[in-house]
Image (cartoon, helix red, strand yellow):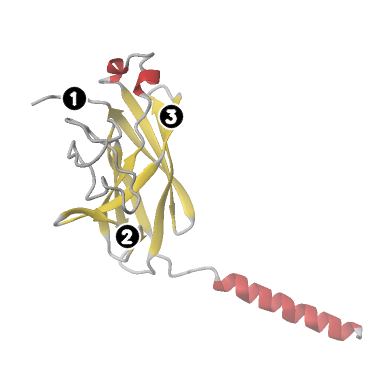
Amino acid sequence: MNRSLKILLALVGATALLTACMSHTRESALDVEASIAAVTLGDDCGSSGEPGDPAEGPGLIGGDCDGPGCGFGCTQTGMRLRLVAAESGDPVPFEVLRVRMYTMDGELVEELSSRNARRFTEEGYIAWDQMVFEGADLAVSYDLDAPDWSAIGSGEAHRTYGMSFRIEADVRIDGIERTLEFEPASREAEVVT
């Protein structure tokens, strides 16, 4: 094969590769603003968020408890996010990657796993496929693992009531990671009514 033909084939191959790379760049991707609206620090009331889990349902918000693992006065640890999308663009996926809980002095206390993604509708919270569409203004909620309150309270979980913490959540929106922050989040004492 002569040298000119080799150069021509190399240029054709490079052009094809460049075109393929450019086709993966989505110029019409939806712009989404995300923030943590609220954090509830409580316990783990039993819902795994997995299909078929008897405790799965509309979500355990503000002590609304139903199913195995739920006891009287159980408040599910969780966070609520607000997602506001631009008026135009292709739908994009949203995902919570990690949630970290820090003392107000910045010491890492614990990493909490998220599960049971839900969005708020006129009927209440319903399961959410974690897709964000153009023009959306979503209130979404995730259950979180409960922190080990006994370890935080030096063996006495009741010492953690009223303590304040800072929460960081790493999220991915259309493949781009961002860190959201919320403070102060406090563990409120259970009130029996």
> Secondary structure beneath disc 2?
strand
Instruction: Give how far across and how far down residue 5 sits, in percent.
Output: 85, 86
Q: Residues within 10 Å of mark 2 (few under 14, many from 20)?
A: many
Residue at image position (32%, 32%) is: 183
Q: In the picture, which quadrant includes the C terminus?
A: top left
> Secondary structure beneath disc 1?
loop
Left-right relation of 9 to 188:
right
Q: Residues within 10 Å of mark 1 (few under 14, many from 20)?
A: few
Amino acid under disc 1: Glu
Q: Nearer the viewer, mark 3 or mark 2?
A: 3
Res. 190 mark = 1
CA separation in Å, label 2 and label 1: 36 Å
Amino acid under disc 3: Glu
Instruction: Give how far across and how far down residue 192 sits, in percent.
Output: 12, 24
Mark 3 and mark 2 lie on one chain; the one further toward the N terminus is 2
The residue that label 3 is drawn on is 110
Residue at image position (41%, 28%) is: 102
- In depth, the one of 47 and 27 nearer the eye is 47
Amino acid under disc 2: Ala
Left-right relation of 25 to 96:
right
Q: In the picture, which quadrant includes the N terminus?
A: bottom right
Q: Nearer the viewer, mark 2 or mark 1?
A: 1
Res. 3 mark = none
Residue at image position (30%, 43%) is: 47
The residue that label 2 is drawn on is 85
Instruction: Give how far across and how far down residue 60 sits, in percent.
Output: 22, 42
Mark 1 and mark 3 lie on one chain; the one further toward the N terminus is 3
CA separation in Å, label 1 and label 3: 22 Å
